[in-house]
Amino acid sequence: MDNAFGQPQNVVVLGGSSDIARAIVRKLCAARTNTVVLCGRNQDLLDAAAAEARDYGAATTETVLFDAEDPGNATRVVAEALAKVGGPVDLVIVAVGLLGTQSEMEDDPEAAARMITVNVTWPVAALTELRARLVAQGRGRILVISSVAAVRVRRTQYLYGGAKAGLDRLCQGIADSLEGTGASLQILRPGFVRSKMTTGQREIPFTTGVNEVAENTLRGLATGERIIWSPPILRYVFFVLRHLPATLWRLLADR
């Protein structure tokens, strides 16, 4: 369970090779997280993330393999991951995601469907199972990595942004449904982040690195705020952007 300082002692990561998730796990382990269960589709990357967690202080690491293109495995993956914790889980990070290239995917029905499956369908199936289990144990937190792209969808990234918007809105509802149960859900909305997912893409204003996102995340976990923005200024930037007239939004967003 969380220690006396409110820090999670055991953590499950769905999407354990994500650069953002790995940065968060490093900081959690440095702050006394003992057990980390990493789930993903590439065993070599999971092993590297597990070794990293141990280097930063984790006493126990476990891995679970799965493919997010198959939502039918979500229940099994959640059950296996939580079983490896060996007791009530403190924090589950949902970091499953696919960015892709809009211009290469928008005329390809299979690629578009894959984007939705990985970014929405699999996480929704996993979250449904997680919600039931955390309510049953009467405690525990879920952190879902969303994106500021979910706040207002751009033409140049509407597949990814639309998928994240669906997940983001669903998570707001799940968070409301958890009120009074002892469990909770928080949403992380990072802006453009330098990572392997964004390699080769043009940086935009307020671009950050994974370590800064992790620092903002740990502050948000400590305060319990429902939505964690990274960097925090994006909360105010998008308060304005979400209300721009469509014509002006398209001019700004497509640059």
Image (cartoon, grey):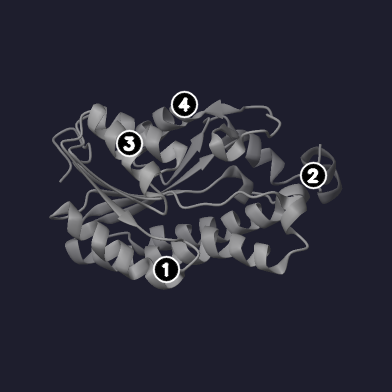
Closest to the camera, between mark 1 and mark 2, is 1
3D distance between C-alphas at marks 4 and 1: 30 Å
Numbered disc 1: secondary structure: helix
Q: Which residue is mark 2?
A: 249
Q: Earlier in the sequence, mark 1 or mark 3?
A: 3
Q: Earlier in the sequence, mark 1 or mark 2?
A: 1
Q: Does 32 appear above or below 75?
A: above
Residue at 50%, 37% in the rendered image: 229
3D distance between C-alphas at marks 3 and 4: 13 Å
Q: Which residue is mark 1?
A: 125
- Residue contact at pointers 3 and 2, CB within 8 angstroms: no
Q: Residue 57 location, x and y as percent?
A: 20, 29
Residue at 21%, 53% in the rendered image: 89
Q: Earlier in the sequence, mark 4 or mark 1?
A: 1
Number of residues whose C-alpha sits closer than 10 Å to that of mark 3, classed few (under 14), some (14–19) or many (20 or more): many
The amino acid type found where label 3 is placed reads: Val
Q: Which residue is mark 4?
A: 212
Number of residues whose C-alpha sits closer than 10 Å to that of mark 4, classed few (under 14), some (14–19) or many (20 or more): some
Q: Which residue is mark 3?
A: 25
* In-front residue for pair 227/21: 21
Q: Quick check: 238 left or right of 20?
A: right
Q: Earlier in the sequence, mark 3 or mark 2?
A: 3
